[in-house]
């Protein structure tokens, strides 16, 4: 995939001036959104696909990152680097606290506890009337040194962050840590018998996943210039999980392919019918039945 990947990167780098010259700025915004969601989905794929941890509360870290941006900007902090540090740090801390509790359970109990914690965070944010409550909160774009965060600058910033995060995840999942994490997914008892601290490996992956989701949430707040409680709702967690399933659970490019495909399909179907969710559901059902390894698994097949 080296040459196709290189061509894709070159296309993404050249797209903003092409879009500006041809009046396709809408698609530049769509690509920005896809890159942000790809980062969030890839962070979930780390624990879901490689760690076997079915977290249904990933929206908590995603939404917390967005609200961190909105609240800090409202309180007068305008430095983007400071805001990013707080957003990622708070998301990582929340993932640490939730993971320390949830990782002591297994199976459906783990799923339900992660969902319960996410819903607690959702209702907690809604109860803060001074920060918008159910109406959400406006999130102005922060300052990043000498350059203004325009739509084009945000596009390139999102591309750089996604590329850096994917490089980090690639090194991680192909390292000794990643191999142990995958071994835990396959047979936890055997890994315990070999003397590895399973809980610590899972917790580190859980915290890293939450931190990357928080960074994606911060970028989403920059993109929409708005922090909505919907970013914390269980539907958002399900949306991210659909992306991972569609792209391929445990496939490195699964999060990216799933985010791109689902976002494009939703945009197309919304223009065709008000019942676009039915079409999305049918596509997801087809992938689950006939391509259990997702789109990434289909691309990796050899004739």
Image (cartoon, rainbow, N blue to C red):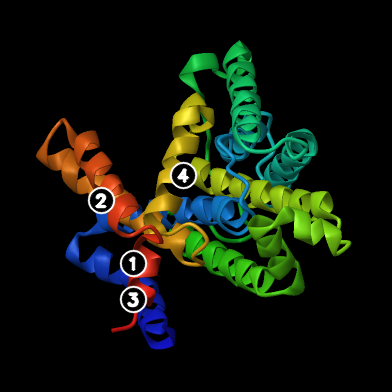
Give the Cα separation between the discs numbered 2 and 3: 30 Å
Q: Earlier in the sequence, mark 4 or mark 3?
A: 3
Residue neighbourhood size for the residue with mark 3, other residues' Cα within 10 Å, grouped as few (<14), some (14–19), many (≥20): few
Image x and y of residue 277, in percent: 24, 35
Provide residue 169's location: percent of width, then percent of height: 62, 66
Disc ID at residue 286:
2
The residue pinned by badge 1 equals: 16
Q: Is residue 251 left or right of residue 275?
A: right
- Name the element at disc 4: helix
Question: Residue placed at 73% from the left, 48% from the top?
Answer: 207
Q: Which is more toward the observer, 291 or 173?
A: 291
Is 168 in front, or is 106?
A: 106
The residue pinned by badge 3 equals: 11
Residue located farthest toward the bottom when viewing the structure as drawn: 3
In the picture, the disc for residue 55 is none
Corner quadrant of residue 189: bottom right
Label 3 SS? helix
- Horizontal side of 25 relative to 143 (left or right) equals left
Mark identifier at residue 240: 4
Q: Residues within 10 Å of mark 2 (few under 14, many from 20)?
A: some
Whether the residues at callouts 2 and 4 have beta carbons within 8 Å, the answer is no
Closer to viewer: mark 2 or mark 4: 2
Q: Residue at x 30, y 47 (%)?
A: 284
Please report whichever mark, 3 or 1, sits nearer to the chain's N-terminal start: 3
- As measured in the structure, the alpha-carbon distance from the residue carrying label 3 to the one carrying label 1 is 9 Å
The reply to whether the C-beta atoms of the residues labelled 3 and 1 are less than 8 Å apart is no
Q: Quadrant of the N terminus?
A: bottom left
Q: CA distance from mark 1 to mark 2?
A: 34 Å
Report how far apart the C-alphas of labels 2 and 4 lie in the structure: 18 Å
Q: Are marks 1 and 2 in contact (CB under 8 Å)?
A: no
Q: Residues within 10 Å of mark 1 (few under 14, many from 20)?
A: many
């Amino acid at each position: 995939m080296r040459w196709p990947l290189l061509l894709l990167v070159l296309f993404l780098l050249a797209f903003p001036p092409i879009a500006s010259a041809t009046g396709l700025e809408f698609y530049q915004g769509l690509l920005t959104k896809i890159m942000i969601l790809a980062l969030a989905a890839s962070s979930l794929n780390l624990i879901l696909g490689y760690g076997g941890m079915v977290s249904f509360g990933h929206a908590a870290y995603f939404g917390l990152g967005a609200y961190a941006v909105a609240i800090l900007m409202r309180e007068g902090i305008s430095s983007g680097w400071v805001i990013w540090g707080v957003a990622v740090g708070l998301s990582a801390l929340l993932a640490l606290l939730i993971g320390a509790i949830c990782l002591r359970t297994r199976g459906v109990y783990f799923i339900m506890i992660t969902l319960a914690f996410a819903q607690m965070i959702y209702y907690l944010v809604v109860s803060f009337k001074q920060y918008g409550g159910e109406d959400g909160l406006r999130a102005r774009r922060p300052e990043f040194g000498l350059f203004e965060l325009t739509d084009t600058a945000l596009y390139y910033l999102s591309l750089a962050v996604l590329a850096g995060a994917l490089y980090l995840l690639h090194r991680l999942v192909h390292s000794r840590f990643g191999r142990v994490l995958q071994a835990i997914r396959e047979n936890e008892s055997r890994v315990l018998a070999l003397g590895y601290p399973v809980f610590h490996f899972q917790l580190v992956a859980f915290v890293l996943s939450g931190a990357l989701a928080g960074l994606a949430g911060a970028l989403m707040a920059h993109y929409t210039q708005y922090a909505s409680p919907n970013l914390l709702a269980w539907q958002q967690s399900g949306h991210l999980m659909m992306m991972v399933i569609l792209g391929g659970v445990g496939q490195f490019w699964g999060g990216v392919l799933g985010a791109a495909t689902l976002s494009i399909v939703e945009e197309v179907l919304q223009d065709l019918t008000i019942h676009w969710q039915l079409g999305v559901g049918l596509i997801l059902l087809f992938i689950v039945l006939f391509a259990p390894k997702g789109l990434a698994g289909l691309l990796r097949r050899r004739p």
